[in-house]
Amino acid sequence: MLLNPNQVSEKIAAGQNLILAGDESLLKSLPAGNWIGGTIPYFMAAEGGCKRSDLIFATELPKCALGARIEVYQPGKLDHLYSDGATDEVSFIIIPGGSSTHQRFALNAPGYPEFASHPLIGWISGVDLDHLGKVTPKVFAGNATALENAAAVLRLKLPANKFAQINIINLFQQGNGDTITFPAGGFAVTGANINGETSNFSAYLKEKQVDTRLPLVADYAGAMINVSIKSATNEKGEVEFYAPVVPGIEYRIAAPVADYVSSFVAELDRVAPNNVAFSCNCILNYLYSGLEGKTTGGITGPITFGEIAYQLLNQTLAYLTIEDLG
Amino acid sequence: MTPNLIPEPVWIQAVTQSTNAGFEFLAFKILLGTLRMRLQTKSSTPAQCVLDLKAFFTKHASIPAVQRDLEKISKLKAA
């Protein structure tokens, strides 16, 4: 929900466990407590998609929680992210966009001990798009200190009869086009194998007149995982991405989605998640699908520069539900 | 159902085949996709991948969707 800083301060003082999103100056004004936060002025609010620099989006974590602990992970300690989580905890993470923490997590998380075995959900903080390059994204870990190169983590302890289920809504499916693999991974590439033939990927995108608002989509045993294209060519002739491509993974350009909002609501009706405790959606979905002023079936949360559901995602809605065991 | 009740060749099939069996639990799907990538790049072996999968199913045995995914693995045909 969107709140002013005084309202958020009251919730912090009351001991609530909170995930916060808002302008840096607002987050800096908050008292210490059980919260982590990240900078971004875009939100999917109950009233619809909006940009607000005067309000904070607060996600109140479930009251059934037995406690919370807050940690800061410097880039060199990220490999402990999953293994430090207790079996009865779910972990929330916010990482500053464009930082080396962001880069290291994106590139290396799938190789960290206990990857995917501990529930980790969160987002990449960002900035007002009008201020790109002028200010840097920040995160906060339970106090007013802004961090621009570390991950803020809140670990929420759940009762023994509950478990955390992380899921995604990704409207993009693999299209019927070429199979694309990459001999080298990363946020920027020159070469790709197109149906097994070596190719310059930037030239391929140009030749095929690919709509670069459509992500590359990989099929992870039935989960569609996107990598969004940031630039079809940079000064080095590379194609740049918002998440790293991975050697050994087969990608295809996504099939177009005609109407994001109606498709989203239809998918939401199909999966019908109950008890959504946290969700976030991608700035690219917000921009490309014109979400400003539109509602997405009651799913609210920050609009982000990247979503985290175990690993970094693009153009995807990530959400958490707290479910009963047995 | 426990992971050790499933024969080793069936586990090998789960990590080496490219199709999926309508798995449900996101964490498992991401882990399986990652393990298949490691096999493609020869950065892991089928035996190591099977150990990783068994550890996952043992740790999350109480989650209903994980149990359902384990049942689906048990119905795969051995390699």
Image (cartoon, rainbow, N blue to C red):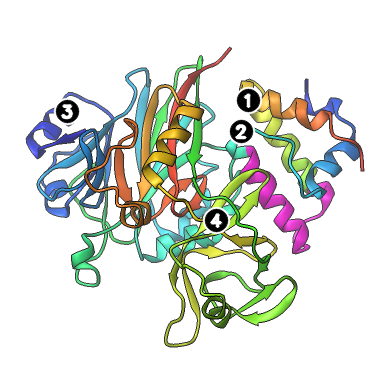
| Circles 4 and 1 on the same chain | no
Q: Chain of mark 1?
A: B
| Circles 2 and 1 on the same chain | yes
Assign a secondary structure to mark 4. loop
Give the residues drawn in magenta, as a range: B28-48
Mark number, residue B25: 2
Which residue appears at 79% of the width and 28% of the height? B3
Measure the alpha-carbon separation of dots 2 and 1.
Answer: 6 Å
Which residue appears at 21% of the width and 33% of the height? A1
Instruction: Name the amino acid type tagged 2.
Output: Phe
Q: Residues within 10 Å of mark 1 (few under 14, many from 20)?
A: some
**Residue A85 visible in the shown view:** no
The residue indicated by pointer 3 is A11
Answer with left or right where residue B67 lies relative to residue A244: right
Q: Earlier in the sequence, mark 2 or mark 1?
A: 2
State yes or no: residue A117 in magenta.
no
Q: Chain of mark 3?
A: A
Mark number, residue A255: 4
Report the residue that reaches farthest toward the top. Answer: A326
Measure the alpha-carbon separation of dots 4 and 2.
Answer: 24 Å
Instruction: Name the amino acid type tagged 1.
Output: Ala
Mark number, residue B65: 1
Instruction: Name the amino acid type tagged 4.
Output: Ala
Q: Nearer the viewer, mark 2 or mark 3?
A: 2
Disc 2 + disc 1, Cβ < 8 Å: yes
Disc 4 + disc 1, Cβ < 8 Å: no
